[in-house]
Image (tube, rainbow, N blue to C red):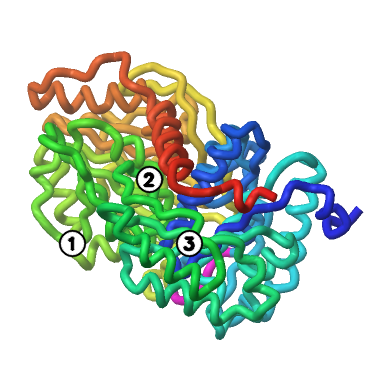
């Protein structure tokens, strides 16, 4: 039976649309998912199309946006790529990798995307919705839109906003961020650009990120309701908890809030940075200050630095060289610095990178081959096929412990055959997952393909203690607080705040 024939019998889907990108759609969906779970419902998140390099891998090896994985955690369920059937991973020059139901199926320019991928994209969205309802007939979908639903040059080919809302006949909430200013114009302008059929789907308005006394906006609320004839369901106060950013642009506003830090970490903000949710466990550590590094500088003040994953590894390596950061990193290593490279960062730490299919940002000028930072005796060759999988293994350094994470990469890394560093060792029992070197000057260089490595509490704790010991700081207790428990606490606090201020019952029926 087609989904359209089932819609009268299912619980009414809720859809969160925004007046702009960054209005708070992802967090609102996350909060609603947890609220509904607490009400005894069976919520399932859904976003038809997401554009993000911040990815997660489900248990079948399918890629999906991390924001939908986080929303699934809020529902208390296992994430699946069906919850985000289309993922676009930008790779520069107005091109993106296209992923359908977790699998990479091509690369497209922005100009050609709507011409070549609109019809198959809509089919995969409908396929996912039917599959979700077939497996979970009693669920309530909590759907997230993307950007603004009324980009008039794109609205006729928008796969993931009003087209999904009308298909599901969803009860829609329009979210606006008052912190950005112009909240009245945001709301009224968005509604004015909808046609009557679309506008009638908007059942409520939500004002997000309000600072100060909420009662001061009472007149504003009345004006909006009088002008639009749509109820304001809530005004959400400014929340201080640390939530993962939706995309790399949000990192520009991401600041560390640690008071009286004892350690400082530098994360290199690569132009094509990916999987930056890897560092959320560090953001939530007490006494650690995070600094995002974008330009050449003296790194010696930092206790360790991280070179993160990249969607365009060679292009980002060229950025490090041209900006002078590559020399800063080498000097930092020579001065007993501690470095961790994750995925693309691991590849950059090696001696050479070969890109015979020009998939990672190289070009004919370099012949598809470029020198790495030369801090680990490794060479990487980028192949056509991508490896995506969940990983369970055992670490060998800085401690022996069970460890979980996931891989997303095309590169195959191996010894370059040199004897430049005789001390390089395998980081895990799975010998292809990572390497480390404790150099003579007292620093460490670590490279791993494992995303989510810092979510492993005992491993993270032991690595941090290794550095704290060298600084003559007291070591952290072995019974460190679990990041996953912390993440649950953050989601719970988020949901509690929304539940206080959002009249969710008005969109449940």
Rendering coords of residue 392 (x, y %) = 53, 27
In the rendered view, would you say 158 is above or below 231?
below
Upstream in the sequence, badge 2 or badge 3? 3
> In terms of secondary structure, where does tag 3 sit?
strand
Q: Residue at x 35, y 21 (%)?
A: 458
Residue linked to disc 2: 243
Rendering coords of residue 433 (x, y %) = 45, 35
Upstream in the sequence, badge 3 or badge 1? 3
Quadrant in the picture for residue 201: bottom right
Q: Is residue 307 left or right of residue 356?
A: left
> Front-most of 15 and 46?
15
> In terms of secondary structure, where does tag 2 sit?
loop
In three-dimensional space, the C-alpha distance between marks 3 and 1, rounded to whole angstroms, equals 35 Å
Q: Is residue 114 left or right of residue 332?
A: right
Q: Can you see residue 43? A: yes
Residue linked to disc 3: 175
Q: Residue at x 39, y 38 (%)?
A: 448
Residue linked to disc 1: 295
Q: Report the span colored magenta.
A: 93-97
Nearest to viewer (mark 2 / mark 3): 3
In three-dimensional space, the C-alpha distance between marks 1 and 2, rounded to whole angstroms, equals 25 Å
């Amino acid at each position: 039976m087609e989904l359209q024939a089932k819609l009268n019998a299912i619980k009414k889907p809720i859809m969160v649309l925004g007046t702009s990108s960054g209005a708070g759609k992802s967090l609102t969906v996350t909060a609603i998912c947890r609220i509904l779970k607490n009400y005894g419902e069976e919520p399932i998140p859904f976003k038809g199309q997401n554009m993000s390099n911040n990815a997660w891998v489900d248990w079948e090896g399918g890629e999906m946006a991390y924001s939908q994985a986080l929303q699934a955690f809020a529902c208390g369920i296992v994430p699946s790529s069906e919850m985000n059937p289309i993922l676009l991973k930008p790779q520069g020059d107005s091109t993106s990798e296209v992923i359908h139901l977790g699998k990479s199926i091509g690369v497209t320019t922005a100009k050609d995307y709507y011409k070549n991928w609109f019809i198959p994209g809509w089919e995969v969205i409908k396929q996912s919705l039917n599959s979700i309802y077939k497996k979970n007939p009693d669920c309530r979908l909590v759907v997230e839109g993307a950007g603004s639903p009324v980009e008039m040059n794109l609205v006729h080919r928008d796969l993931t906003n009003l087209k999904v809302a009308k298909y599901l006949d969803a009860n829609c909430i329009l979210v606006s961020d008052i912190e950005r200013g112009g909240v009245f114009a945001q709301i009224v302008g968005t509604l004015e650009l909808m046609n009557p059929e679309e506008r009638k789907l908007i059942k409520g308005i939500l004002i997000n990120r309000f600072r100060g006394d909420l009662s001061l906006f009472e007149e504003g609320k009345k004006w909006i309701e009088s002008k639009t004839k749509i109820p304001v369901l809530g005004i959400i106060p400014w929340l201080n908890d640390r939530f993962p950013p939706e995309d790399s642009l949000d990192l520009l506003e991401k600041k560390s809030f640690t008071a009286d830090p004892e350690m400082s970490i530098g994360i290199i903000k690569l132009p094509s940075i990916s999987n930056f949710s890897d560092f959320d466990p560090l953001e939530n550590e007490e006494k650690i200050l995070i600094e995002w590094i974008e330009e050449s500088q003296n790194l010696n003040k930092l206790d360790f630095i991280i070179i993160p994953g990249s969607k365009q590894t060679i292009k980002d390596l060229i950025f490090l060289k041209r900006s002078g950061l590559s020399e800063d990193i080498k000097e930092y290593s020579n001065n007993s610095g501690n470095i961790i490279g994750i995925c693309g960062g691991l590849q950059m730490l090696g001696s050479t990178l070969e890109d015979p299919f020009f998939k990672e940002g190289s070009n004919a000028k370099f012949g598809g081959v470029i020198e790495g930072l030369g801090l680990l005796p490794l060479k990487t060759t980028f192949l056509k096929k991508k490896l995506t999988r969940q990983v369970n293994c055992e670490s060998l350094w800085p401690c022996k412990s069970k460890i979980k994470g996931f891989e997303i990469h095309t590169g195959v890394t191996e010894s370059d055959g040199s004897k430049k560093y005789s001390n390089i060792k395998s980081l895990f029992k799975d010998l292809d997952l990572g390497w480390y070197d404790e150099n003579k000057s007292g620093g460490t260089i670590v490279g791993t393909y494992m995303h989510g490595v810092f979510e492993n509490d005992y491993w993270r704790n032991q690595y941090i203690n290794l550095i704290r010991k060298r600084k003559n700081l007291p070591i952290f207790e072995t019974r460190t607080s679990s990041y996953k428990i912390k993440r649950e606490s953050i989601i719970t606090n988020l949901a509690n705040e929304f539940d206080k201020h959002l009249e969710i019952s008005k969109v449940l029926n």
